[in-house]
Image (tube, rainbow, N blue to C red):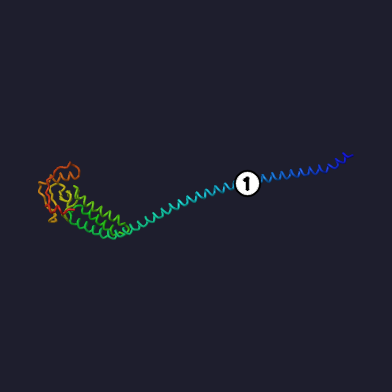
Amino acid sequence: MRAVLWILCALPLVALAQGTAEQALDQSQALVREARDSQQRIEQLDDATREALERYRQAIEQREQLVDYNARLSEMVSAQGEELEALQTQLASIEDTQRELLPLMQRMYQSLQQFVALDLPFLLEERAERLVQLDELLKSANVSVAEKYRRLVEAYQIESDYGRTLEAWRGTLGEDEQVRVVNFLRLGRVMLFYQSLDGREQGYWDAGQDAWRPLPDSYRRTLEQGLSIARQQQTPVMLRLPLPPVSEQESGL
């Protein structure tokens, strides 16, 4: 009977113990879950911290790059400013030079025009046409000063080259009914000769008298040789031809 009573009395205690154990187990599991959640939160916070740190490092690196870029950009702007100032100075100098160069080129053209008028009468149409074109070029507002100067110097160079060349060509001599076709021979700017096509008449330009003078028939063969040499039909040889006085020779370009 006592045993039954003891068992009956112990049953509530067992039930109470089981309830306490289950409650402890639930609390333990809750603590485990909370710990796991806390660990996950800690890991997430750790990842976020690492990401934030990486972004911070990248921001610092970008800042340093931007600082270096700005420094280089400032140097470039400063250098371009100095270059612009130098260019403005050069442009001002060029404008001054152009203002001085235009009157100079006009005087050069007038000198060239006078020289051609006083020179030996050879290639008159060609040289006159060159002067006309040059005059139109100098008056044109659509042509740069540099191009005008280049063409003017080119004309001077052509005239200068005439003084160092031997040239032969066929042209007309005389006026009105006396016009006839002859061969011309130019020895630089020293002498200008002509010879008729049949070789029976020859002469030279007398710069002192501003007129053509005849040459004796003894120069016929020499002039024929000179014409052949100028046309590269014969090897150069010594030619015996009359020359003007020294004072006339020194008057050349």
Residue depicted at x 51% and y 50%: 60
The answer to whether residue 188 is visible is: yes
Left or right, 100 with respect to 211, comes to: right
Relative depth, front residue between 23 and 17: 17
Left or right, 161 with respect to 45, comes to: left
Which residue corresponds to mark 1?
Answer: 42
Q: Residues within 10 Å of mark 1 (few under 14, many from 20)?
A: few
The answer to whether residue 184 is visible is: no
Relative depth, front residue between 69 and 161: 69
Left or right, 54 with respect to 120, comes to: right
**Quadrant of the image occupied by residue 206:** bottom left
Q: Position of residue 179 (x, y in %)?
A: 17, 53
> Looking at the image, how many numbered discs can be counted on the residues?
1
Q: Position of residue 49 (x, y in %)?
A: 58, 48
Residue depicted at x 81% and y 43%: 13
Residue furthest out toward the right: 1
Vertical comparison of 149 with 17: above or below: below
Q: Position of residue 208 (x, y in %)?
A: 12, 55
Vertical comparison of 61 with 6: above or below: below
Residue depicted at x 27% and y 55%: 149
* Circle 1 SS class: helix
Relative depth, front residue between 103 and 169: 103
Q: Position of residue 66 (x, y in %)?
A: 47, 51
The image quadrant where one finds the N terminus is top right
Q: Looking at the picture, which amino acid does disc 1 mark?
A: Ile
